[in-house]
Image: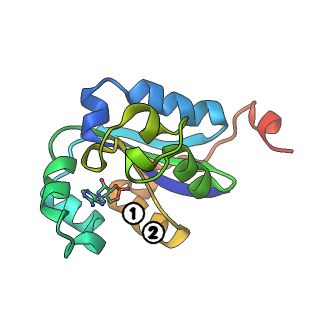
Amino acid sequence: MERTLVIIKPDAVQRGLVGPILTRFERRGLRFAALKLMQITPELAARHYAVHKDKPFYPSLIKYITSGPVVVAVIEGNDAIKIVRTMMGETHPAQAAPGTIRADFGMEIGRNLVHGSDKPETAAFEIPLFFSDDEILSYQRAIDSWIYE
Ligand code: CMP
């Protein structure tokens, strides 16, 4: 079972897309291990996006991600990192495949609605930035045996 950090970004919250986006993950069979509404501070944004700090888009990225409330989640399942990223689509919505979140709801890279960890090491770094251990729950659902063999 793999865990990934998902951020439903300020544009998606403002556009009333929290429910539709979370529903997609839930319907797929993924499980929420943690979920909360929060405002990302500039300090937290700088830690989360440290890898991009020398990129030309960094200042606008920090402004965007701190511009309003976000919903953050730890989502788990077998191959959760790959499955979530495939569901989100390419970073630029214009390049994202139809049926993905970014293609179905987005128009440009600076308003791409969602973030998901790109690999296990990134998830291991990102999850503790947003959640303490006691906010992340381990549990089974009755439907899990209908999702996995
Ligand atoms: P995310 O998956 O959160 O990871 C880094 C973010 O930087 C990305 O989604 C976009 O929101 C943003 N980003 C990446 N490349 C660009 C770019 N060329 N111009 C503007 N924003 C970008």
Residue furthest to the front in view is: 94
Specify the amino acid type for callout 2: Thr
Pointer 2 residue Cβ closer than 8 Å to ligand 1: no
Is 108 placed left or right of 148 in the picture?
Answer: left
Is 56 placed left or right of 27 in the picture?
Answer: left
Res. 99 image quadrant: top right
Is 121 placed left or right of 56 in the picture?
Answer: right
User: Distance of mark 2 from mark 1, alpha carbons?
Assistant: 6 Å
Q: Position of residue 112 (x, y in %)?
A: 33, 45
Disc 1 secondary structure class? helix
* Disc 1: which residue: 126
Residue 92 seen: yes
Of 124 and 59, nearer the camera is 59
Q: Residues within 10 Å of mark 1 (few under 14, many from 20)?
A: many
Q: Are marks 2 and 1 in contact (CB under 8 Å)?
A: yes
Residue shown at 26% from the left, 36% from the top: 11
Of 67 and 140, nearer the camera is 67
Specify the amino acid type for callout 1: Glu
* Disc 2: which residue: 122
Q: Position of residue 55 (x, y in %)?
A: 21, 71
Res. 133 image quadrant: bottom left
